[in-house]
Image: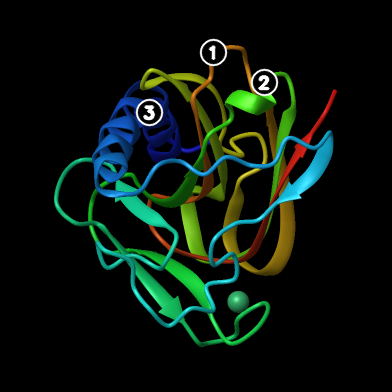
Amino acid sequence: MSLSRIAILALLAGCALPHAHAATTEATEKTPALRTPPAAPTNGVPLANPGFESAQSGPRGDPVGWFTFQHAGPPSYRYVVDTDRPHGGARSLRIENIGPEPYGAIAQAFDPKPHVGKTAKLSGWLRTRDANDAGAGLTLLVLQGGATVAYNYQFDAPVNGTTDWKRYTISVVIPKGADRLEVGAMMRGKGALWLDDVELELVAP
Ligand SMILES: [Ca+2]
């Protein structure tokens, strides 16, 4: 593992979650109430615009249904609805590093309260270009009162280098007291990530 990669992982471990929280708190204030997934034992949860096929933008210029955020500092990631080689349909989402900050991400948020104890299982198709630092991955973040209580950022198997479309799946158990679930993907360091055809399931134990 290179020194720069260690430094980025250390930054993510120490700083990423509070900053991510600050950014998403801001997003919460500007977006409608959290959607509540139906309380069936095991089921897929409909995501908004899961394949980035909408040509419209949301209130902050993000893809409809999603919010974007990055590590504090100068704008370092660009979020583009891209028609070049989507996985499905006519478009995918590209997160592209353009500056010094260590991560840029996209997510959408749900109310997990009826689903405590279940496993949130997130799948999505990713491809990358020159993701040579800490790489890219899907993200699951669970909050309680704004504090992180569980997460899976695909740190155990990040997508590195230049890769073609592949489906990835990560999961996290929703702990008691959780009041916000964020699902999405993150580009860490230099390079570009494409995301398409995202699926979320809440699986009973
Ligand atoms: Ca698509």
Report the amino acid beneath label 2. Val
Q: Which residue is mark 2?
A: 116
Element type at mark 1:
loop
- The image shows a total of numbered marks equal to 3
Residue 65 position within the rendered picture, expressed as x and y whole percent measured from the top left: 45, 60
Residue 30 position within the rendered picture, expressed as x and y whole percent measured from the top left: 25, 48
For the residues labelled 1 and 2, the Cα–Cα distance comes to 8 Å
Give the mark nearest the N terminus, 3 or 1.
3
Q: Residues within 10 Å of mark 2 (few under 14, many from 20)?
A: some
Give the mark nearest the N terminus, 3 or 2.
3
Element type at mark 3:
helix
Q: Which residue occupies 34% across, 29% down?
A: 11
- From the image, state whether disc 3 or disc 2 is nearer to you: 2
Report the amino acid beneath label 1. Gly
Give the mark nearest the N terminus, 1 or 2.
2
Q: Which residue occupies 67% across, 41% down?
A: 157
Left or right, residue 167 beside residue 141: right
Q: Which residue is mark 3?
A: 17
Residue 56 position within the rendered picture, expressed as x and y whole percent measured from the top left: 38, 79
Q: Which residue is mark 1?
A: 177
- Quadrant of residue 170 in the image? top right
